[in-house]
Amino acid sequence: MESQTSPMADGDDVPAPVVFLSYSWTDSSHEQWVLDLATELQNAYRITIRLDKWHVGGPGGDPIQYMESMVTDPSVGKVLIISDRLYAEKADGREGGVGIEAQILTPHLYKQAGGDGKPQKFAVVVTEKDERGRGIVPAFYGGRLYIDMTDPDRRSERLVEIQRWAYDRPVHVPPPLGGRPDFLSDGPTTGTDGLSRRALSALIGARSDAVRTVEDYFDMFAEGLSEFIPGEQAQLELATERLSAAYLEAERVVLELSRARLGERGHAALRRFFESLFPYLRPEHDDGAIGIKWDWQTDPFDFIVPELFRSAICALIRAGDFEGVFSLTSIDYVVTKHGGRLAQAFPFPHFQSGVHDPSLRGKIRSIRERRGSLFPLVELIQADVILSLLAYHHRSDGGFMTSYWYPDLIGEYERQTLHTPLPTFAKAASRSHLSRLAVGFGLSPDGLRELVVAISDMDMQEKRRHGLASVRYAIITNSENIGSKQ
């Protein structure tokens, strides 16, 4: 007797399942249909098929004994019933070989409970439907789900369904149990754990409600940040540390939103998100609704908000969405006091207002390192540098910028890591990539090249005057080679 695990491809550690086909010899065309199905399942879908025409043998073979052995043999993992009208009639009337087989199958089938998530040994393929459009199945099969192969156009889809059933790999499986709800944890939370999972699921699944779900998450996240406002100045470090989990959660949603490439709808959601965070940086725009009373209470948010903004730029660059970079940096953020009064517009560098408490400021690097990020350091530095160049460009272009974005990661980490061009500037040696990168600046490719060369040629004193870091921009922006290739 052949084992269920015998037919294996070289180097394959997953045994091919063994499936017995039960069917009626209705007529020659139906027998050929079953034979074709058996051949395709075995050759194309790696399922070992047991079929009377192949295994009973010639004259003298006992098909009844063979059928009984196929149902009871433990090496046969599955039984697939091919049900047409004649099969159902013979099974219900207990006629002929099908009737005998039905008697053998019935008690085993009833032992197979439905809806318990366990592998199902028996399944029915329907090849005919009744006048009401319902699949014709024998009475002993009851109301169990069947595989409908009456539509030739969906044959390939149904064959995959049979394959997954044979391998006990259903299409729809319950997701893993989520993590501990954040409201059960000690200390403050944004209360967005469940909503973040829902937003990620909508984005990854490309659902039509993805943007709305993300906006709901952003709204709750912004509101929930009020739980982290420190009550005493001595709690600044603790409050900042506690924000780490919230930061990583929001960073994940921002990353998936950028990957989804939802265009202006996604860009608008990001802009609205950062506008909703602005009151945590400016107490005068709180109006008591959030609960910030003193300037020092903004310090934890003065740290996390620019970090999130930098991560958003990272995510957009990684996705090649330079239109998104332009959207987040080229338009003022309009912030109003609660109640709709005193509307005021701020350019993006105002998100980087800086941590004021000297004790907390000295611990920012260690807090950042313990927290981590979804992005490697080189991508974070790259986003920092691009934001710095963008702020300089808008300011020098007579634009709205009144302050600069300082790339503080360069000052905090080893500068010897910056001896080669940053990734997107290395790619910008190609004119095609330079054209895409230039979109983020609202410039032509030649205009961006001129900007990069001009900054590279500045002396250190001039760079400091414009809020640029004292690093060799000629190297990290690849100014010598930018746009030099087709």
Image: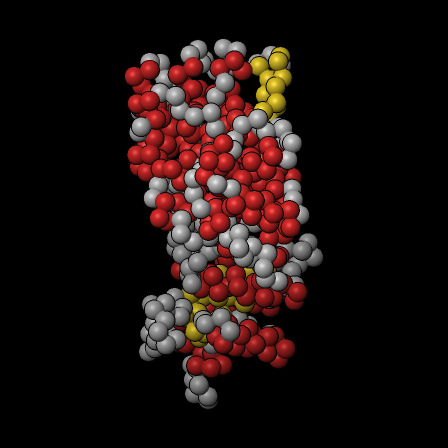
Side of 339 relative to 412 (left or right) = right
The x, y position of residue 104, in whole percent, is 42, 65
Whether residue 29 is situated above or below residue 229 in the rendered picture: below
Looking at this view, is 38 or 128 the one in front? 38
Residue, x 50% and y 27% (percent of image)? 351
Colour scheme:
secondary structure
Q: How many marks?
A: 0
Say if 149 sits above or below 267 in the image: below
Pick the front one: 12 or 370: 370
Quadrant location, the C terminus: bottom right
Q: Judge from the rendering whether residue 32 lies leftward or rightward of residue 291; answer left or right.
A: right
Instruction: Identify the residue at image location x=44%, y=85%.
Output: 57
Q: Position of residue 253 (x, y in %)?
A: 49, 38
Q: Position of residue 410 (x, y in %)?
A: 40, 40
Report whether residue 305 is seen: yes
Residue in the foreground of this view, choosing between 401 and 329: 401
What quarter of the picture does the N terminus occupy?
A: bottom left
Q: Residue at position x 59%, y 66% from top?
A: 156
Give the residue at the far right of this rendering.
131
Query: Which quadrant of the view contains residue 177?
Result: top left
- Asked if residue 4 can be seen in this view, the reply is no
- Residue 7, horizontal then vertical, whole percent: 38, 76
Of residues 299 and 189, the one nearer the viewer is 299
